[in-house]
Amino acid sequence: MQGRKALIRRAGEKARAASNIMKGMAVATDPGRNLCLWLKKRQNPLFVSVEIETTSICNRKCLYCPNSVAERPAGNIPDELFTKIIDELAEMNYSGRLSPHLYGEPLVDKRIVRFIAYARERLPGAFIKLFTNGDLLTFELLNELDAAGVDVFRVSQHDKQADSRLIDILQRYTGIAGKHKVEYMKYFDNDENLMNRGGLIAVRHDVNMKFCTYVSGITIDFEGNMLLCCQDYLAKHKLGNLKDENIMDVWNKDSYKSLRDRIESGMWLTALCRVCNGRESGNGGNNSSAGQ
Ligand code: SF4
Ligand code: SF4
């Protein structure tokens, strides 16, 4: 059953990726899919996405990213902690989305190919989606990551002009691997999709959302903290730490369950939620963290 669900999810992701590839436009939020995710979440208490920050370091400081306005510690997840997390996910046959990022650029981490390969081996049913700004991407690295097990690359453009070097690489790669392998997202003039990152970033649009499904995924920073959601740049809401706790023990804490239920019902209990505009999209199954 888990395998069938994973196949359906992967087919959906791939269809969306194919339609968005290289359009040079933003990938639109899909309200129908968000509603499905929310309904699914109501029936199935397991999380639908996992983001693991392997490094907190990014080579950029985009204006619409908290990396440009606030400091947080620089560091990499210890090897053994990454392995522990993947092993725990393997024990539960996790088959949702897995993405190795939060507010760092995954390709800064030289272990990334090895990490992807390990995750692929242990989580054959997971949908591995790698978000990157593409600055460090080469044709060779793209193919290495593909061979290691990435299902889809989400490559974001953060400059006004597209990087012709990067576009060439992506076109060569998709010519071989297929257009479904890359989603290209232009952030630079994409104000409508920008989030305020828990109030740290000024954005033009406001919100009036009835519920938020971001809590249907789990977010793990490079220090092993399980956070409320990917908007928690400053790690204000730590639900547990995976250095000495297990994912399911944290996920099943009464206090965490109650918080999730209330947030999903539109009760903005935390200071972070009250100023957040991320809840607008209700996009918990496919949220990108740092606008990667
Ligand atoms: S938006 Fe992405 S590329 Fe830009 S600073 Fe943030 S993490 Fe780095
Ligand atoms: S409302 Fe914002 S801060 Fe609160 S859980 Fe949703 S996305 Fe996170």
Image (tube, grey):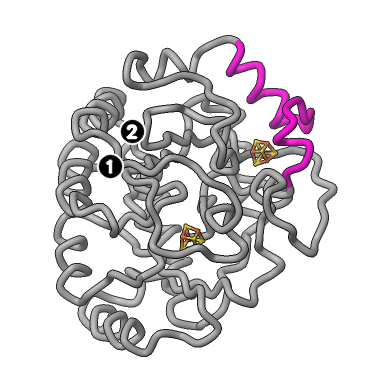
Residue drawn at (33%, 54%) of the image: 106
Q: Is residue 5 visible?
A: no
Residue 218 horizontal/vertical position (percent): 48, 33
Q: For this view, does 256 lie left or right of residue 110?
A: right
Give the residue at mark 2: 94
Identify the magenta region: 255-276
Disc 2 is placed on an element classified as loop
Disc 1 is placed on an element classified as loop
Residue drawn at (21%, 31%) of the image: 83
Asked if ligand 2 lies within 8 A of label 1, the reply is no
The secondary structure that most of the magenta stretch takes on is helix
CB of mark 1 within 8 Å of CB of mark 2? yes
Residue drawn at (59%, 17%) of the image: 257
Give the residue at mark 1: 125
Q: What amino acid type should be assigned to the residue bearing mark 2?
A: Tyr
Q: Nearer the viewer, residue 128 or 52?
A: 52
Q: Considering the image in quadrants, where does the N terminus appear?
A: top left
Q: Nearer the viewer, residue 58 or 194?
A: 58
Q: In the picture shown, does residue 208 fall above or below 48? A: below
Q: Is residue 239 visible?
A: yes
Q: Nearer the viewer, residue 197 or 7?
A: 197
Asked if ligand 2 lies within 8 A of label 2, the reply is no
Residue 202 horizontal/vertical position (percent): 74, 58
Tell whether position 132 is magenta: no
